[in-house]
Image (cartoon, grey):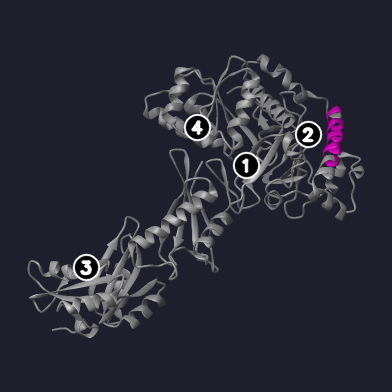
Amino acid sequence: MKIQQLSLFVENKPGHTAAPARLLANEGIDIRALYLADTEQYGIVRMIVSDWKKAAGILEAYGYVAKATEVLAVEVPDCPGGMADVLGALDGSGINIEYMYAFPYPRGDQAILIFRFNDPDAAIARLQAADINVLAGDQLLKKQ
Amino acid sequence: MNSTLETTVTDCHPASVPDYTPVSELRELQLKRLQAVVTRAWQQVKLFQSRLKARGLEPVDIRSLEDIAKLPFTVKNDLRDTYPTGLFASSMKDVVRLHASSGTTGKPIVVAYTKEDIDVWTSVLVRCLAGCGLHRGDIIQIAYGYGLFTGGLGAHYGAEALGATVIPASGGNADRQIMLMKDFGVTAMCCTPTYFLHLIDRAADLGVDLRELPLRAGIFGAEPWTDSMRRHIESASRIEAFDIYGLTEIIGPGVGCECRQHQGLHIFEDHFYPEIIDPETGEPLPDGTEGELVLTTLSKQAMPMIRYRTRDITMILPGVCECGRTIRRIARIGRRSDDMLIIRGVNVFPSQVESALLAIEGTLPHYQIILTRTQGLDQMEVQVEVTPQMFNDKIGALQGLQGRIQSALDHVLGIRIKVALVEAYSIQRSEGKAKRVIDRRTA
């Protein structure tokens, strides 16, 4: 259920995000989801890639600081209230979202929410109990 | 400014009399005081006595001024290693004042003064200011920081004893400084030269023309500055700019100062005995040769410094000054023999940055210090490479890290700096070693 997301530290300067993206492209790594968290000085590129171990190896070889983090991918109906229902399922559980991002799914009527929880195992149990689909890594990486 | 324009009564200030002591008499006085201070340090300071014993020396072995070369050096680390009171030669009840400057590892360098020491300090400051042509009737604004830093209080006591009107403005708040200068007809400023540059710019913004004010002298110190800075200051504000020299370990400002000839800085050598040595070998060098300045406090009670290595590179100027003073002069100081940085008058060592970073993460990340100058004020940025150990993919965690580094450095250095997190390997390395300091400050 838990998916390895790769996070990368980049300075907030022109070209600093393009360079690692090019490195991954050259090695045939597909970026399935990406989110850039930014501050005035620097940013964190968070991405889910087709082969995280290979990607981490490439980035490290070029001197980047990359870190794998466990996140959950949750499938929701791409309609009003889809995300609210998922968040509602966590109400009162004490589980904290450290960050999240969303993207539409190629299948059309579904969207994907990526979460980093303080307690991913508790979150999985809670979401599944509410009949919410927590995706396995290979499901997310599969292309339609 | 042309120094022959006027001869003021101020050169006859009673405190200035020792400036004109006949050389043979001065040397006799120096030897007598040297023997006394060596004896005092031998009796009161364990470290000094044990160092002398290790060389088979006793105070009676100092029979001439040349014998000073037999004595061991004192270095900045000695002050740190004996913190807080290990080099005090007076009991605490006789110490009337403490001052401090930053040390290399977070512990400050602390110095002590007896009543007599304060009197000596005051008298040399009077001699500095009198030599700059200031006297009773002058209005002197002191924009050095007041506090543990020696600059503010040192200049204050001297200016007051001179008989001038003193405005203890302390550092910062440029608009208020300019208002005071204008409204009270300030005739002389004591501050760092870069701060005065800032005041020049700020005054222009406020529509105040410094050239129209009664201001006629600036006594600038606590950091090295250049002749091109002097020319800029003098033309932009129509004042006469003087270089004053000093260091906390010896007494504070007032170890030496320019007279109106502006041909080097007179050292008040009846109290501070100067030598120039080869910084590599420690061998004494003759007058006129560039080397490291070593100073011995001839009359200090609370904390005698014997052959203190200043790390400042200069030379003793041969010949006699046209002003008639017999005390010798050193050339203006342009560089140092160690890696100490002077930022807004505060001493900073790259090793302080290093130990603070090490303390936070347990490992030392690559870092670089970037120095720039905006509006006449030095700015220091510390760039820190984010290592895998430090990296966390939560923004809040990185901001927390940045904040911890910031407060640790502010605390250790005692000045506000900027911290920037940068990518790994983004700091250039030459032969595997990163260049620690990039100084983009220009005169």
**Magenta part of the chain:** B25-39
Q: Position of residue B367 (x, y in %)?
A: 49, 60
Dot 2 falls on a residue whose secondary structure is loop
Q: The residue under label 1 is which amino acid type?
A: Ala
Which of B9 and B231 lies nearest the eye of the viewer?
Answer: B9
Q: Could you tell me which residue is drawn at 86 percent across and 42 percent down? A: B66
- Work out how far the residue at label 1 is from the one at label 4, CA to CA, in angstroms: 24 Å
Q: Residues within 10 Å of mark 2 (few under 14, many from 20)?
A: many
Dot 3 falls on a residue whose secondary structure is strand
Q: Earlier in the sequence, mark 2 or mark 4?
A: 4
Chain under callout 2:
B
Q: The residue under label 2 is which amino acid type?
A: Ser
User: Residue A101 has which mark?
Assistant: 3
Identify the residue position indicated by label 1 in the image: B100
Q: Residues within 10 Å of mark 3 (few under 14, many from 20)?
A: some
Chain under callout 1:
B
Identify the residue position indicated by label 2 in the image: B299
Q: Please check the rendered image and state whether residue B37 is part of the magenta-colored stretch, yes or no.
A: yes
- Please say whether residue B332 is visible from this viewpoint: no
Identify the residue position indicated by label 4 in the image: B196
